[in-house]
Amino acid sequence: MRIAPGFIALLIALMPALAGCARTDDPRAHAGINADAENWASSGRTSGDQNYSPLSQINTGNVRNLALAWSYDLEPGNSVTAPVAFNGVLYTATGYSVVTALDAKTGRELWRYDPHTARAAGIKLSYAWGSRGLAYDNGRIFVGTQDGRLIALDARTGAVAWTMQTTEPGDNRYITGPPRTFNGKVVIGHGGADVPGGARGYVTCYDQATGAQVWRFYTVPGNPADGFENPAMEMAAATWAGEWWRQGGGGTVWNAMTYDSDLNTLIIGTGNGSPWDRKLRSEDTGDNLFLASLVALDADTGEYKWHYQVNPGESWDYNAAMDIQLADLRIDGEDRRVLLHAPKNGFFYVIDRTNGAFISAEPYVRVTWASRIDPQTGRPVENPDARYRNGQSFELWPGPPGAHNWLPMAFSPRTGLVYIPAAERPAIISDTAVDAAPLLPGAHMSRLVAWDPVAQQERWRVDTPGIAGGGVIATGGGLLFQGQIDHRFNAYDARSGDRLWSFDAGAPAVAPPITYEVDGVQYVTVLTGYGVSAGIYATLNPAYRVDYRTMPRRVLTFAIGGNATLPPAIEPEPLVAPHDPSFVADPARAARGRAMFNGVCLMCHGVDAVAGGAAPDLRISATLRDRALYDQIVMDGVLVEQGMPAFAGALPPAMVEDMRFYLRTRAQELPPATRDPAR
């Protein structure tokens, strides 16, 4: 299957038993790692984003007694999100940023807020899949929406304190990532670099109390004729060529942001170029700052401090938007303040966070685009063929979805190891397309990798099912928690990788888990169900495909000695295609429809219309026989509130009709026993 480069990203689109609630007091636990141990108030738990909790009531000695304490059923929609917990209340942002507050001990709903994102998003509803998380600070919940709003809610009541539109009229920007908070401020980025027409990336900082904008930092330069916002943009412009600004440039900050309280520095991870291929956006020259970079900003003013670029002249969707973790490590006999980063490109980086100086980098998966990172310059030594010039193709490892995507890794100061949900997934890339065939079954694998950031070596690995593993957390009890697409939620020994406990969640459990304490009891929470990109991965892994109609989407919370049980599983209904007596095969028309479907619709409805669980399987839709009803859904948006975008004005009617014909063709390809003449 060949997919235009602008859409491939849419495929993408982690000791001994101790009594009571003892905390670790490891001397290496710096960078805020032990702060506020009872709560998990933001993505990554602390401002340093380590995805580590010092809580140890649940530990290697008693995790076998961990059991379900309660569950809460969610509505259909994205549930691959990271919740937060503060002072006995659990908060989630599922679907299109619907925020729910639950009693963390019982699962009782306290309040629910729906920002009606689907209605407000317009065509932006087709760009992504909803919220990846939210943040708590100073009595408020902060959440972004796909239409670009940042909303502050009263954490006690759910009442709206303020709303700010962070994007601009008519742009391609949208929000899926969680906000970050610090020092009475809240900061948010956006996506949009992969949308046709692209976007110019920026991050914006707001006052938590009022919503007033404090500062904004652009990540790539705009049109020089308009002047530069600051010296950093003037410096960056010297690394671009041609009229890059006409296509946005890219560099969107759609996920990774980390606050270093020691240095009052916000470190952001920037995305890929817009468009991907440097030949198209910058005359095939220049580093194109600040694409695929770690950029440090003064947290008070947003002024540039330093940067480190993981992929100069980025051309593979190798963005640096994966989590950025702070640590204090002893390297070559010297105590260093560092950041740890495992971006898409397959190398694990240790960078001095005081000045952006390169310390080390080594591959943690198979890498073909570069042989190494030069220790003197910190720049990759590229394979010249990786630039796919003059119509030549290149076997790219890792492929554009990356060796590590947004689901977080974890750093444990107890073991000194980083735990990466890593993936081996190649692609064949050329000037005209990305061949996704290597992403199909048999050409990929995933694993949980324990990595020593000082020695830059793997310490152990555990193979995990399918093309991607879930988010990872580490704990003071010597444990790792990670869920998988095979419905298992697992606990591992952080030192050995031995699996010590496993729970059948009844659905994929790839969301980032969290752990927290209420009234002296430690809890672990994870959400189940697919998000859109995870649903696509399921279409590439038939064994892990689930039915959108019956897949449970739940909040699951565990404690030692829990005594709750899950409701009985609902057996999926058979795929029964509608009776379509007027259908006449037309291979050429079906091929046109297939190309468009896989370019526009696969993000939700699956590769070649084989849905993985994120959205309905359209091969069995009764609307396929009725063009008027089909157009009401696809063009007019009668199902917008259910997450189905309206494409009127965005897609030509003839194209939409070709896609309908392709779906009718796919329905006819179902085994005859599944076709029901009565329908």
Image (cartoon, rainbow, N blue to C red):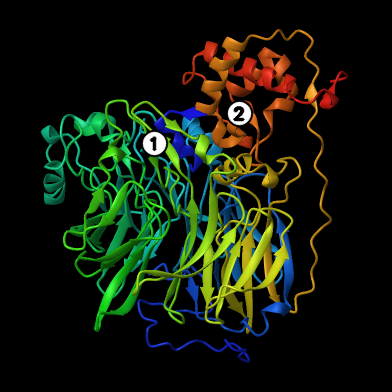
Can you give x and y, in whole percent of width and height, for residue 466 in the image?
60, 50
Can you give x and y, in whole percent of width and height, for residue 519 in the image?
63, 82
Say which amino acid is labelled 2: Asp
Quadrant position of residue 348: bottom left
Please state which of residues 529 and 104 is positioned toward the viewer in this rendering.
Answer: 529
Q: Give the residue at mark 1.
A: 194
Q: Secondary structure at mark 2?
A: helix
Say which amino acid is labelled 1: Asp
Please state which of residues 424 and 536 is positioned toward the viewer in this rendering.
Answer: 424
Left or right: residue 441 compared with residue 179? right
Closer mark to the observer between disc 2 and disc 1: 2
Decide if residue 651 is in sight here. Answer: yes
User: Disc 2 versus disc 1: distance between alpha carbons?
Assistant: 21 Å
Labelled pair 2, 1 in contact (Cβ < 8 Å): no
| Figure check: 662 above or below 333 | above
| Figure check: 237 above or below 555 | above
Q: Give the residue at mark 2.
A: 608
Neighbours of disc 1 within 10 Å: few (<14), some (14-19), many (20+): many
Quadrant position of residue 183: bottom left
Residue at 44 percent of width and 39 percent of height:
427
Left or right: residue 165 compared with residue 312? right
Q: Secondary structure at mark 1?
A: loop
Can you give x and y, in whole percent of width and height, for residue 400 in the image?
42, 42
Residue at 52 percent of width and 19 percent of height:
648
Residue at 43 percent of width and 71 percent of height:
46
Please state which of residues 260 and 361 is positioned toward the viewer in this rendering.
Answer: 361
